[in-house]
Image (cartoon, rainbow, N blue to C red):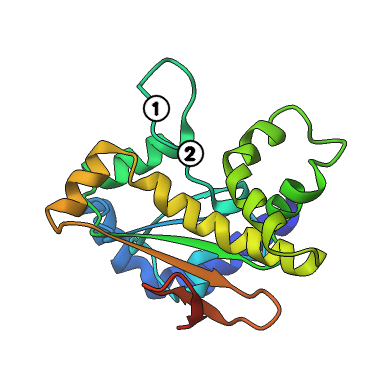
Amino acid sequence: MDNLLDGYRRFRTTSWPERKILFEKLAARGQRPQTLVIACSDSRVDPSMIFDAGPGELFVVRNVANLVPPYTTPDHDHHGTSAAIEFAVRVLEVSQIVVVGHALCGGAGALIDGAPEKARDFLPDWINIAAPARDIALKLSEDPEERRRIVEHQCVKLSLRNLETFPWVREKLAEGQLTLHGAFFAVATGVLERLGPDGTFAPA
C-alpha cells in the first residue's frame, strides 16, 4: 500500500493542481463520456494510456480476456459486465463502444491450455464464454503462438457479436446512435491495430 500512497502524493503534488478545475467541472456536471471501452484486466493494458484520454472521457469495463457475455433474461445472478454495458448505453448514452484485445493475453492462453491450477473457482466458466474463439483457432492452426494470436483476435470479434445480442444495443445501432469497434494492442511494440470491415486487424 505504501507505494500506492506515494503515487497518490505525487498526483496531489504534480497533477492535481493542473487538473483541479477539470475535476471540479466533472464533479458539478457529472460524467458524460462518449466512449465505452471494454478491455482486459491485464495490468499492462491501460485504455486511458493507450488512447491518451483524460478524466471523464472514457467509461471503462475491464475483465479477463475483454469478454462480453451474451445477453440473458434478467435474473438475480451477478452480471457485472452486462450491468456496466447497460449503464453506459442506456444511462450515459455513449455513442461508441470499443472492444480492445491485446497480445500475450492470459485469458486467451487459458482458453487453449486450461485455467491455472490455482484459478479454478470462477475462471473456467468465465473464459468458456469464448469457447467458439478457441474452436476457430484449433481449426485454423497447429502452431501454439499462432493459435494464441487467433484466439486473442477472435475474442474481440466474439465480444462485438455478443454486444449485438443486447436488445437496447441493437436498437441504438439501428437508429444510428451507436457504433461498435474492435482494436488490438501489442504490448511489446505499443502498436494498436483496428478491426476493419473485412474482418482483419491492421495498424490504426
Mark 1, secondary structure of its residue: loop
User: x, y percentage for residue 169?
Assistant: 26, 45
Q: Amino acid at mark 1?
A: Thr
Q: How many marks?
A: 2
User: x, y percentage for residue 138?
Assistant: 72, 55
- 81 vs 197, nearest the viewer: 197
User: x, y percentage for residue 159?
Assistant: 47, 50
Left or right, 52 with reference to 123:
left
| Outermost residue to the right | 117
**Label for residue 69?**
2
Q: Amino acid at mark 2?
A: Pro
**Label for residue 72?**
1
Graded by Cα atoms within 10 Å as few (under 14), some (14 to 19) or many (20 or more), the crowding at tag 2 reads: many
Q: If the image is split into quadrants, where does the C terminus sit?
A: bottom left
- 149 vs 35, nearest the viewer: 149
| Outermost residue to the front | 139
102 in relation to 94, above or below: below
Residue at position x 69%, y 30% in the image = 122
